[in-house]
């Protein structure tokens, strides 16, 4: 079940109502064009837009402001949320505020948006590039849909989609009677236990459970989905890139091989020059080709000429061309050799990309965006220590992304003790204890990429990723850590001391 369907959205709205109802909106801002943050008195959440789709993160973590900070929906700050209202059978809901304004969350696939309504009119919107949203009226958001049982809808999936376009396909399930329809409708509208199905990645309701885990489930889904999509998108880009480069290089090799073979069997240019000299009297000026007698084989031969040169200078051009032939042959042979090696390398790269199963399998290809054009701009510097993948955050904002999207709960987290610096993640291997030597070298990296770099020895804290949490109200990258241990190391990049 896709996360953008009326039942999932309705469940989100009802659960969110329990968290923000009667609370004041303290802050609302964005640190990028793809994320907006809402902080209430005792609860905070974020909306992430990935390729236009809306993903919710209800981790209640406090987000700090970065250099791209921009206030959003200032009309609502310091006003109280009266409640969160689901729009029945719609992919949207809204938060009512005590100043009469309504903040609507429109989860319409890649045209998702957050809109502020005053009565029936949109007065502000987060994604301003969706220009048609400014013309929406309130009845476009809430159409008062009332599903009625129609037997023919359950004869085929096509009928079902035509009659109930607002329902997910899973709803049709085992419905055979109107009673089944009403009971299923009631179950879906009251479901609060959501599970993540990772293959294929989707959500499902446990219609028998009464556990209310909606916000946690959606937050976990967002994390898994974005990790999965970043990987699949990067993989697809790499496969396309290597496939395109391979085809271009194969065409390049074919053209140079052909030129090389033609040049090897071609008539010697000094002989053509001598034939021209032997026929000077028969070659007029201003012609592009001429048929004359071949003094070597005593038969007619067609010779190409430069019509801007006289016969003597054309002969001289052929003599010069003959002298250059060994160099041209050498260059063509070099091009063929280099292209063959490049093709072998591209075939290997393409195979690695096609067979990659996770992001770490692509690490050798992923680089910073440069003027030459990188693949993706990841928020960390990758290192390999004794076969272990080690990720070093670049700055405060990337430290946060590293924790949120590129680390797992059992990974090892390290940070220079009591000073500013990069978060370091060691990707652990299942059923394999981390060697002390890897811990020490990863700690040296953490010390090196910190304000302790100039010290002879530095203290580094480490613990499992699951014991690292953001500090409420703190700026990006600030965390609180439990069950930490410390190690004293020399700040350095392993292998470069």
Image (cartoon, rainbow, N blue to C red):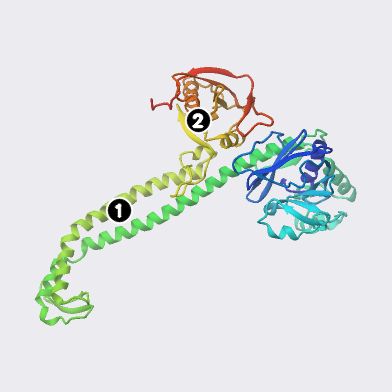
Q: Position of residue 319 (x, y in %)?
A: 14, 66
Left or right for 132, reference 352: right
Res 390 label: 2
In the rendering, at what x and y percent does residue 132 appear? 71, 60
Label 2: few (<14), some (14–19) or many (≥20) C-alpha neighbours in 10 Å: many
The secondary structure type at the circle numbered 1 is helix
| Numbered disc in front, either 2 or 1 | 2
User: Seen from this angle, which residue lies furthest right?
Assistant: 179
- Reading the image, the residue beneath label 1 is 336
Q: What percent of the width, then of the height, locates residue 27?
A: 72, 40
Instruction: In this rendered view, identify the residue nearer to me: 215 or 459.
Output: 459
- Contact (Cβ within 8 Å) of mark 2 with mark 1: no
Q: Is residue 490 left or right of residue 36?
A: left
Query: How many discs appear?
Result: 2
Label 1: how many residues lie within 10 Å, few (<14), some (14-19) or many (20+)? Answer: some
Is residue 318 or residue 468 the one in the foreground? 468
Q: Nearer the viewer, residue 40 or 161?
A: 40
Give the Cα distance between marks 2 and 1: 39 Å
Query: From the image, which quarter does the C terminus lie in?
Result: top left
Name above or below for residue 360 compared with residue 261: above
Q: Mark 2 falls on what kind of element?
A: strand
- Look at the image and tell me in which quarter the N terminus lies: top right
177 is higher (above) or lower (below) than 272: above
- Tell me which label, 2 or 1, sits earlier in the chain: 1
Which numbered tag is attached to residue 77?
none
Image position of 127 (left or right of 332): right
Is residue 56 visible to us here?
no
Residue 247: horizontal and vertical position, in percent?
A: 42, 55
């Amino acid at each position: 079940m896709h996360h953008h369907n009326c039942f999932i959205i309705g469940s989100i709205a009802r659960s969110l109502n329990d968290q923000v109802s009667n609370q004041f909106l303290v802050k609302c801002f964005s640190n990028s064009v793809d994320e907006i943050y809402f902080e209430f008195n005792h609860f905070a959440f974020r909306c992430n837009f990935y390729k236009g789709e809306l993903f919710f993160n209800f981790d209640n973590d406090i987000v700090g402001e970065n250099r791209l900070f921009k206030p959003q929906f200032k009309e609502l700050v310091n006003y109280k949320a009266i409640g969160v209202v689901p729009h029945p059978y719609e992919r949207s809901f809204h938060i009512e505020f005590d100043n009469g304004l309504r903040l609507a969350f429109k989860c319409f696939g890649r045209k998702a948006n957050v809109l502020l309504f005053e009565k029936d009119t949109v007065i502000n919107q987060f994604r301003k590039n969706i220009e048609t949203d400014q013309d929406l009226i309130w009845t476009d958001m809430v159409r008062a849909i009332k599903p009625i049982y129609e037997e023919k809808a359950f004869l085929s999936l096509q009928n079902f989609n035509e009659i109930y376009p607002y329902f997910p396909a899973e709803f049709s399930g085992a419905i055979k009677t109107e009673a089944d329809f009403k009971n299923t409708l009631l179950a879906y509208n009251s479901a609060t236990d959501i599970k993540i199905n990772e293959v294929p990645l989707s959500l499902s309701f446990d219609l028998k459970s009464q556990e209310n885990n909606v916000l946690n489930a959606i937050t976990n889904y967002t994390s898994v989905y974005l990790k999965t999509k970043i990987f699949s998108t990067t993989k697809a880009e790499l496969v396309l890139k290597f496939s395109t480069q391979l085809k271009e290089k194969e065409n390049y090799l074919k053209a140079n091989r052909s030129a090389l073979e033609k040049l090897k069997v071609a008539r010697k240019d000094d002989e053509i020059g001598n034939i021209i000299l032997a026929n000077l009297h028969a070659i007029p000026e201003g012609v592009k080709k001429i048929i004359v007698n071949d003094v070597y084989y005593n038969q007619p031969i067609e010779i190409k000429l430069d019509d801007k040169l006289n016969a003597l200078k054309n002969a001289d051009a052929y003599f010069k061309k003959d002298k250059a032939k060994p160099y041209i042959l050498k260059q063509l042979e070099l091009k063929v050799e280099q292209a063959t090696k490049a093709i072998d390398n591209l075939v290997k790269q393409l195979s690695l990309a096609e067979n990659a199963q996770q992001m770490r399998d692509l690490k050798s290809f992923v680089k910073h965006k440069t003027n030459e054009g990188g693949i993706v701009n990841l928020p960390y510097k990758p290192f390999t220590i004794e076969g272990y993948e080690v990720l070093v955050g670049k700055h405060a904002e990337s430290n946060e992304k590293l924790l949120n999207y590129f680390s797992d709960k059992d990974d090892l987290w390290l940070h220079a003790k009591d000073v500013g610096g990069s978060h370091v993640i060691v990707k652990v291997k299942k059923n394999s204890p981390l060697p002390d030597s890897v811990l020490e070298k990863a700690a040296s990296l953490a010390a090196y990429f910190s304000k302790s770099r100039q010290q002879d020895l530095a203290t580094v804290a480490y613990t499992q990723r699951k014991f690292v949490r953001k500090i409420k109200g703190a700026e990006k990258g600030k965390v609180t850590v439990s069950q930490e241990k410390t190690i004293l190391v020399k700040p350095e990049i392993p292998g470069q001391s």
